[in-house]
Image (spheres, grey):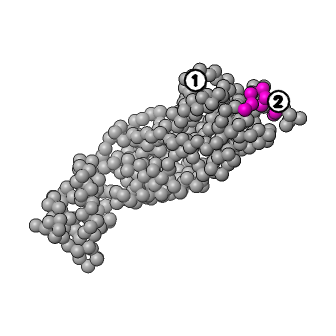
């Protein structure tokens, strides 16, 4: 029997290292080695790492086609990008895809990526990938309030993991950032600075996150002892133009807000434009806190203070969760959430103007 110090040379292709060679070198059964390499949940993490290190050291590479026949797995995670989304080409998409790919690769899996132009095409793409057995499961990003992708995957009994949460948790595994906690904390910070009239600009109401973030904002207002004015609540702002329109409407009120909380950074950048159009300085005359951490916020003046999402880490975590789901773990045990990181960069400060002062400044610029 070979020992850990007496094993075949690195695989050069002529003498391919087999799973038997790895099991002999470690003194483990072939079944244990195989299950460790395929990330089965019944294998201890220490054993899994030991097997992977030895396999890498010996140059063991499974024949993917033979392995697929034997296990029934393609060892690939699926992701369908919806190109019609308002930010489908944003820079954070590259970070997210890198994370998904890295997470899959760490387990010896690959990422299979597809794109779709609209919701109907998205469902067709899912169905085609399932029919062709190109993937073992799917990552479903940006969950909707009524999500037909989830309905389809449930019907087909295909493993999936959500980047986000859903009101109906049946068969659902997920990873999500607690945006509602960020909104609550944003109100707390603004109230501590002295703001009493705070506007809220929500994101797209079709997304599941919107209700969560509004609930967080309202909870923050209650905690701070502040009243909520319905005129200071805006919805469906996911672009700069939409954020600007909502902020402009609020700033033209008789009692405008002195600060804004935005569910997404793109809307917050619209607040910058609205404020500038009335001669108001961001960070002093009015303040803004937001959520996402997109690169654009760092280029604003002053830089946008925001709750940042690590999209690379998120993608990697989602890959790992999906692989565990494919290998048999219960979805109820695969639900992880995390706090976003606050970046305090200068767009929020103590109010230099009262609501009446802001209303006067706006009226002056409109005349």
Task: Indicate whether 250 appears above or below 12.
Answer: above
Res 175 seen here = yes
Residue farthest to the bottom, as pictured: 14
- Secondary structure beneath label 2: helix
- The picture quadrant where one finds residue 171 is top left
Quadrant including the C terminus: top right
- Secondary structure beneath label 1: loop
- The picture quadrant where one finds residue 331 is top left
Instruction: Name the one closer to the observer, 60 or 131.
Output: 60
Q: Classify residue 256 as left or right of residue 40.
A: right
Task: Indicate whether 293 appears above or below 365.
Answer: below
Question: For mark 2, does the 10 Å Cα neighbourhood hold few (<14), some (14 to 19), or many (20 or more) residues?
Answer: some
Which residue in the protein does label 1 denote?
224
Picture coordinates of residue 186, whole percent (x, y): 58, 34
Compute the Cα span from label 1 to label 2: 27 Å
Which residue in the protein does label 2 denote?
360
Instruction: Name the one closer to the observer, 336 or 339.
Output: 339
Picture coordinates of residue 332, whole percent (x, y): 35, 37
Q: Earlier in the sequence, mark 1 or mark 2?
A: 1
Task: Indicate whether 302 appears above or below 103.
Answer: above
Q: Residue at x 40, y 36 (%)?
A: 170
Picture coordinates of residue 195, whole percent (x, y): 66, 28
Q: Which secondary structure is most common in the magenta stretch?
A: helix
Q: Residue at x 36, y 58 (%)?
A: 106
Magenta span covers which residues?
352-362
Q: Residue at x 45, y 40 (%)?
A: 338
Task: Indicate whether 33 appears above or below 272.
Answer: below
Picture coordinates of residue 130, whole percent (x, y): 42, 53
* Magenta-span inclusion, residue 201: no
Res 76 seen here = no
């Amino acid at each position: 029997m070979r020992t850990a110090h007496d094993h075949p040379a690195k695989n050069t292709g002529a003498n391919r290292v087999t799973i038997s060679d790895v099991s002999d070198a470690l003194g483990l059964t072939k079944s244990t080695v195989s299950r460790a390499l395929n990330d089965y949940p019944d294998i201890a993490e220490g054993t899994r790492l030991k097997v992977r290190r030895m396999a890498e050291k010996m140059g063991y590479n499974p024949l993917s086609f033979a392995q697929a026949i034997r296990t029934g797995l393609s060892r690939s995670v699926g992701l369908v990008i919806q190109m019609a989304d308002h930010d489908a080409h944003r820079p954070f998409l590259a970070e997210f895809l890198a994370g998904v790919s890295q997470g899959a690769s760490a387990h010896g899996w690959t990422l299979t990526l597809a794109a779709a132009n609209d919701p109907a095409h998205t469902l067709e793409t899912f169905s085609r990938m399932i029919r062709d057995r190109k993937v073992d499961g799917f990552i479903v990003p940006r969950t909707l309030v009524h999500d037909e992708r989830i309905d389809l995957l449930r019907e087909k009994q295909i493993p999936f993991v959500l980047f986000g949460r859903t009101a109906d948790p049946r068969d659902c595994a997920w990873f999500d950032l607690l945006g509602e906690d960020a909104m609550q904390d944003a109100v707390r910070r603004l109230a501590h600075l002295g703001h009493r009239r705070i506007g809220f600009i929500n994101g797209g109401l079709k997304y599941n996150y919107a209700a969560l973030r509004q609930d967080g904002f309202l909870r923050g207002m209650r905690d701070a002892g502040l009243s909520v004015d319905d005129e200071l609540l805006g919805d469906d702002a996911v672009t700069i133009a939409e954020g600007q329109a909502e902020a402009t409407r609020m700033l033209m009120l008789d009692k405008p807000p002195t600060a804004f909380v935005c569910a997404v950074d793109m809307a917050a950048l619209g607040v910058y434009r609205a404020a500038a159009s009335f001669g108001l300085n961001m960070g002093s005359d009015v303040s803004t806190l937001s959520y996402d951490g997109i690169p654009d916020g760092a280029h604003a003046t002053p830089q946008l203070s925001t709750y940042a999402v690590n999209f690379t880490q998120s993608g990697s975590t989602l890959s790992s969760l999906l692989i565990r789901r494919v290998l048999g773990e219960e979805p109820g045990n695969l639900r992880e959430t995390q706090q976003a990181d606050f970046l305090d960069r200068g767009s929020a400060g103590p109010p230099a103007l009262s609501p009446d002062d802001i209303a006067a400044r706006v009226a002056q610029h409109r005349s």
